[in-house]
Amino acid sequence: MNNKKVLFLIEAVLGFVLLFIGFFVVNSEALKMLSGLCIGLGAALAALGTGQLLQALLIPAFEMERLKKQKEIEVNDERNIRIKEKTGYRVAKIMNYVLSLYILVLGFMGAGLPMILLAVSLLVIEFVLVIYFSNYYARSL
């Protein structure tokens, strides 16, 4: 086994050990937070390590290189870049409406002023960022 496969195996084993510790060793009520941390971290490490190990074992190295090159081409493809830009624009536009509706709901529910101001500050921050980045990219292009 090469170094990457050994690292993936260690990652997976460490994840399963943390899962075991979280479920069976640290199970008292006083250490509930530590148990949850072990379970969460263990599940993530076990899943990532196992997945990467299976990928490294099942896909040959030359095929993996070809897939990496293909992915790099797709990531830098102009069409995909435009799709990401349009998607980001639409999501930001829709989130403005969702956040505005959320602020109205907070107001009608009688939420405290600090809670409403916190939500409004998110909208203000977003508008300031839109102005800043619009000016920044207008100058650089």
Image (tube, grey):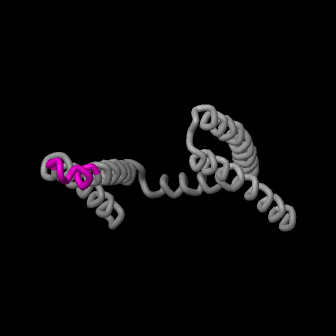
Viewer-proximal residue, 94 or 97?
97
Answer with the quarter of the image where residue 61 lies: bottom left
Residue 69: x and y in percent read: 59, 57
47 with respect to 60 (left or right): left
Residue 103: x and y in percent read: 65, 39
The quadrant of the rendering that contains the N terminus is: bottom left
Q: Residue at x 58, y 50 (%)?
A: 114
From what the image shows, is residue 8 above or below residue 22? below
The quadrant of the rendering that contains the C terminus is: bottom right
Viewer-proximal residue, 116 or 129?
116
Residue 31: x and y in percent read: 19, 53
Q: Residue at x 36, y 48 (%)?
A: 51
Confirm whether residue 54 shows in the render.
no
Q: Residue at x 30, y 58 (%)?
A: 11
From what the image shows, is residue 10 above or below residue 92? below
Residue 64: x and y in percent read: 48, 54
Q: Residue at x 69, y 56 (%)?
A: 125
Viewer-proximal residue, 78 or 64?
78
Bounds of the magenta segment: 27-36
105 with respect to 79 (left or right): left
How many marks on residues? 0
Q: Would residue 99 be counted in the magenta stretch?
A: no
Confirm whether residue 72 shows in the render.
yes
